[in-house]
Amino acid sequence: MAQCPDIPSPGTRMYVGKLLFAQIMDFAPWTSFRRVATPNGGDRRSRTINCAEQFRVMVFAPLTWRESLRDIEACLSAKARKLYHMGLCAGRFNAA
């Protein structure tokens, strides 16, 4: 009887590296992002998250097929324990 290729065998281990979203965010040119955002006052009127975190959230939304701000917030609240590992500040996206 052949084993299903989708089910890992008992001896295999899970991947323990960075999350896929964090790996994608490593490709973003953060020095260029800061060079553009700082002189233009990107964080000037922000109350809770800075412009870099907002950029990360806006990249996260289409990757997870989110369609509205409420949907994005619900998804981020559901993944509250993984936010830090994704590169987002944990605790800022909790539902009130």
Image (cartoon, rainbow, N blue to C red):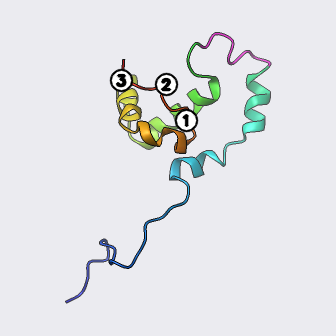
Q: CA distance from mark 1 to mark 2?
A: 9 Å
Q: CA distance from mark 1 to mark 3?
A: 18 Å
In the rendered image of this protein, does residue 88 appear above or below residue 14?
above
Query: Which SS class for mark 3?
Result: helix
Farthest top residue in view: 45
Q: Is residue 56 magenta?
A: no
Judging depth in this view, the residue of 77 and 42 nearest the camera is 77
Question: Residues at badges 1 and 2 in contact (C-beta under 8 Å)?
Answer: yes
Query: Which SS class for mark 2?
Result: loop
Which segment did they paint magenta?
Answer: 39-46
Question: Residues at badges 2 and 3 in contact (C-beta under 8 Å)?
Answer: no
Magenta highlight: main SS:
loop
For disc 2, the marked residue is: 92
Name the image quarter holding residue 89. Answer: top right
Numbered tag placed on residue 40 in the rendering: none
Judging depth in this view, the residue of 64 and 18 nearest the camera is 18
Q: Which amino acid type is shown beneath numbered disc 2?
A: Arg
For disc 3, the marked residue is: 70
Judging depth in this view, the residue of 7 and 41 nearest the camera is 7
In the rendered image of this protein, does residue 9 appear above or below residue 86?
below
Q: From the image, which quarter does the C terminus lie in?
A: top left
User: Local crowd at mark 2 within 10 Å, few (<14), some, or many (≥20)?
Assistant: some
For disc 1, the marked residue is: 88
Q: Which amino acid type is shown beneath numbered disc 1?
A: Leu
In the rendered image of this protein, does residue 72 appear above or below residue 60?
above
Farthest bottom residue in view: 1
Q: Which amino acid type is shown beneath numbered disc 3?
A: Arg
